[in-house]
Amino acid sequence: MKDKALGRLSTQRIVEEIADQIKLGVPYIDAVVDYALKNELEIEVVGEIIRKSPLLKAKIYKEAEDLNMVEKLARLPV
């Protein structure tokens, strides 16, 4: 099923649709879950897409850190 779903959808299109929701103020994690539900995809399938987009992956991880869902990574001050 995963291969079939990935074949129908391009990584770029999925990232763009998720980005459109984020521009409307939807949190990253909620946008990803909502995308999966609307397109009847398993969250694991969308997870494979996220792993292919380093920027989206980093933004989701940062949001998870802020929500204390994952352990915070040590970062250099910018």
Image (cartoon, helix red, strand yellow):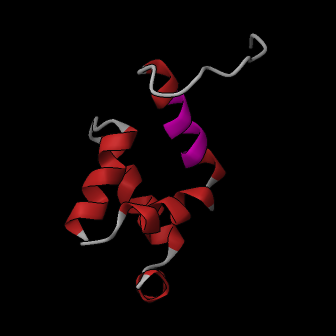
Q: Residue 17 or 4: which is nearer the viewer?
A: 4
- Magenta stretch, main secondary structure, is helix
Residue 5 position in % (x across, y down): 41, 82
Location of residue 62 (image quadrant): top right
Q: Is residue 74 left or right of residue 30?
A: right
User: Vertically, is 41 above or below 36?
Assistant: below
Q: Residue at x 34, y 67 (%)?
A: 42
Residue 72 position in % (x across, y down): 61, 20
Residue 66 position in % (x across, y down): 47, 19
Q: Is residue 66 visible?
A: yes
User: Vertically, is 18 above or below 74?
Assistant: below
Magenta segment range? Answer: 56-62
User: Vertically, is 24 above or below 11?
Assistant: above
Q: The C terminus is located in which quarter?
A: top right
Q: Residue at x 43, y 89 (%)?
A: 4
Q: The N terminus is located in which quarter?
A: bottom left
Q: Is residue 20 visible?
A: no
Q: Is residue 38 left or right of residue 29?
A: left
Residue 3 position in % (x across, y down): 50, 86
